C-alpha cells in the first residue's frame, strides 16, 4: 500500500494510519486530532501522570514522554504481583532526569548508533547531531545514539487513543530536527491481551527521503528487583534461537561492517540452548565484548529465519526467563535484529520505583545496580544506512509516497516453575 502524504500531515491521514493497524478486539480510538474528533470517550492519566491499560493477567502504565512504558505488572508463580520494567514513579520526573536512561521509550528517528553522525542519500551527505563518545576536537561526540541529543525518546508524544486495553501515541518530527531530512509523522500503539503485550510502530515521511529505524528500549528485571538472593538480572536465562550471528563493532560499538559467527559454547552463544546472562562473566573472553573495558553485552544479534515466514508463527526470536519468579517472556517480531544490553552502564544511581524491590531498606539499597537489568531491542541491523554491502537500506530509508516504516512485536508471558539448566553451555 502506498501512502499519499502531503507536506503537512492531516488529522484524516493520522486516523487512516491508525485504522491500518490490524483490528484488535476492544480497540476504540479516542480523543481529538486537530479539528477532527475520534469516536469514543477520552480516558485521562492517573494522579502520577500515567495512562493505564489492562488485559487478562497483565496491566501496564505508560507516559507520553518518549511514548514510554513505565510499569508492567504480572503475577509470579507465588501469585505476587511484580513490576518487571524500569521506570519512574511519576511522569514528571522523566522530563527532568539528567541521566536519561531511555527508560521504556521509543528511540528515533534512528535507533542505536550512526557512525560519524552522518549518512548519504542519493549522493547527498547529511550530518546529524552527535551525542556520544566526546573527545578532543569533538566535544559533543563522534557518533549519534538513538536519534541525537533531542531524539524521540526525549519528547512528549500526544495521546490520540486510549481504551481499556490499548493506547496510541503520535509524534510529528519536523524537517531538519537533529539534522534529519524531511518531516516524519509517527504513531505507536500498545495493546494488552491475555498475558500479552503487543506493539506496532508506524512512521511516514511526508517530504523527503530519510532514515527511519525505531525500537522499544525497555529495561527488564523479571524478578521485579525483589529477589532476596540477588539484585541483578544475571540469573535470567536468555535464548536467541535464530541468533547465530552478530554485528561486529569497534571499541565504541560502531559497526565495522563485519558479520561474526557466534560459535557454539562461546560467550555470545545464546542460540544453541538457553543460558544465564551471567554464565560467562568469569570468562576473560567477555571483557571488551560490549566495548572497550566493558564486560557483558551490548550486542546486535542477527535474526536469521528461513524465508518465507510468518513472524507470529515462526517461533520467538528471544526467550527471557527468571527461575526465581518463574516469569518468562517470549518475544515475537517482524524485525531482523535483536540488541541485548546487560545494563553494564548502570551504577546504582537510579532509584527503584515504589512498586519494586525489597521493602526492607536495611537489606539492600533500593537502586538499579550494575547488571541489574537487561534491555532487549527489536530493530533492524544497526547502522545499516552506512553499510550498503548489507543490503539493508531499503528497510531503513523511506520516502514520501512509498510504503511506511512498520515495526511489530508481541511479548507473550507465561509462568514456569520448573528450574532449567541455569548456567547452560559455555559457562566458566
Image (spheres, rainbow, N blue to C red):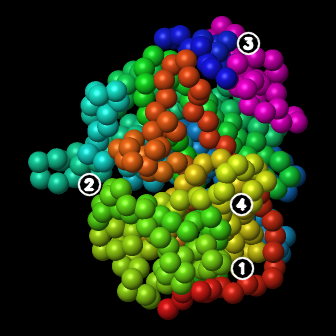
Magenta-tinted stretch: 16-44
Q: Nearer the viewer, mark 3 or mark 1?
A: 1
- Residue 257 within the segment the image draws in magenta: no
Picture residue at 64% right of the left edge, 15% below the top:
13
> How far is mark 3 from mark 4, CA to CA?
38 Å
Sequence-earlier tag: 4 or 2: 2
> How far is mark 3 from mark 2, CA to CA?
45 Å
The residue that disc 3 covers is 37
Quadrant containing the N terminus in the rendered view: top right
The residue that disc 4 covers is 316
Determine crowd level at label 4: few under 14, some 14-19, many 20+ residues with C-alpha closer than 10 A. Answer: many
Sequence-earlier tag: 3 or 4: 3
> How far is mark 1 from mark 4, CA to CA?
19 Å
Location of residue 226 in the rendering, given as x and y in whole percent from the top left corner: 65, 73
Picture residue at 56% right of the left edge, 14% below the top:
5
Residue 377's disc number: none
Q: Nearer the viewer, mark 3 or mark 2?
A: 2
Residue 323's disc number: 1
Determine crowd level at label 2: few under 14, some 14-19, many 20+ residues with C-alpha closer than 10 A. Answer: some
The residue that disc 2 covers is 133
Picture residue at 53% right of the left edge, 59% below the top:
302
- Residue 36 within the segment the image draws in magenta: yes
> How far is mark 3 from mark 1, CA to CA?
48 Å
Amino acid at each position: 500500500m502506498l501512502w499519499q502524504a502531503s507536506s503537512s500531515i492531516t488529522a484524516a491521514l493520522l486516523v487512516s494510519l491508525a485504522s491500518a493497524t490490524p483490528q484488535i478486539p476492544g480497540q476504540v480510538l479516542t480523543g481529538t486530532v486537530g479539528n477532527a474528533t475520534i469516536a469514543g470517550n477520552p480516558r485521562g492519566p492517573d494522579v502520577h501522570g500515567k495512562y493505564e491499560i489492562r488485559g487478562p493477567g497483565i496491566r501496564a502504565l505508560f507516559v507520553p514522554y518518549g511514548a514510554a512504558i513505565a510499569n508492567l505488572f504480572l503475577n509470579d508463580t507465588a501469585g505476587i504481583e511484580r513490576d518487571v520494567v524500569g521506570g519512574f514513579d511519576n511522569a514528571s520526573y522523566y522530563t527532568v532526569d539528567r541521566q536519561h536512561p531511555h527508560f521504556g521509550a521509543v528511540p528515533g528517528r534512528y535507533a542505536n548508533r550512526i557512525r560519524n553522525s552522518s549518512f548519504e542519500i542519493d549522493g547527498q551527505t547529511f550530518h546529524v547531531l552527535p551525542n556520544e563518545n566526546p573527545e578532543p576536537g569533538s566535544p559533543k561526540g563522534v557518533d549519534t545514539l538513538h536519534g541525537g541529543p533531542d531524539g524521540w525518546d526525549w519528547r512528549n508524544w500526544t495521546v490520540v487513543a486510549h481504551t481499556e486495553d490499548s493506547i496510541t501515541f503520535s509524534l510529528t518530527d519536523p524537517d531538519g530536527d537533529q539534522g534529519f531530512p524531511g518531516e516524519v509523522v509517527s504513531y505507536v500503539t500498545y495493546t494488552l491481551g491475555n498475558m500479552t503485550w503487543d506493539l506496532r510502530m508506524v512512521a511516514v515521511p511526508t517530504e523527503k527521503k530519510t532514515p527511519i529505524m525505531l525500537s522499544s528500549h525497555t529495561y527488564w528485571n523479571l524478578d521485579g528487583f525483589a529477589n532476596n538472593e540477588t539484585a541483578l538480572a544475571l540469573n535470567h536465562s536468555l535464548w536467541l534461537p535464530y541468533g547465530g550471528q552478530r554485528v561486529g563493532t569497534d571499541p565504541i560499538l560502531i559497526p565495522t561492517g563485519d558479520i561474526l559467527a557466534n560459535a557454539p559454547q562461546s560467550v555470545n552463544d545464546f542460540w544453541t540452548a538457553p543460558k544465564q546472562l551471567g554464565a560467562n562473566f568469569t570468562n576473560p573472553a567477555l571483557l571488551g565484548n560490549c566495548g572497550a573495558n566493558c564486560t557483558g553485552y551490548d550486542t546486535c544479534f542477527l535474526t536469521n529465519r528461513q524465508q518465507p515466514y510468518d513472524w507470529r508463527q515462526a517461533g520467538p526470536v528471544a526467550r527471557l526467563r527468571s527461575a526465581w519468579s518463574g516469569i518468562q517472556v517470549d518475544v515475537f517480531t517482524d524485525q531482523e535484529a535483536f540488541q541485548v544490553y546487560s545494563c553494564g552502564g548502570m551504577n546504582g544511581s537510579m532509584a527503584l520505583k515504589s512498586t519494586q524491590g525489597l521493602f526492607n531498606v536495611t537489606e539492600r539499597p533500593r537502586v538499579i545496580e550494575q547488571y541489574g537489568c537487561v534491555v532487549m531491542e527489536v530493530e533492524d541491523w544497526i547502522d545499516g544506512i552506512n553499510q550498503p554491502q548489507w543490503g539493508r537500506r531499503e528497510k531503513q530509508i523511506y520516502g514520501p509516497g512509498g510504503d511506511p516504516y512498520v515495526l511489530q512485536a508481541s511479548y507473550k508471558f507465561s509462568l514456569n516453575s520448573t528450574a532449567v539448566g541455569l548456567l547452560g553451555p559455555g559457562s566458566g
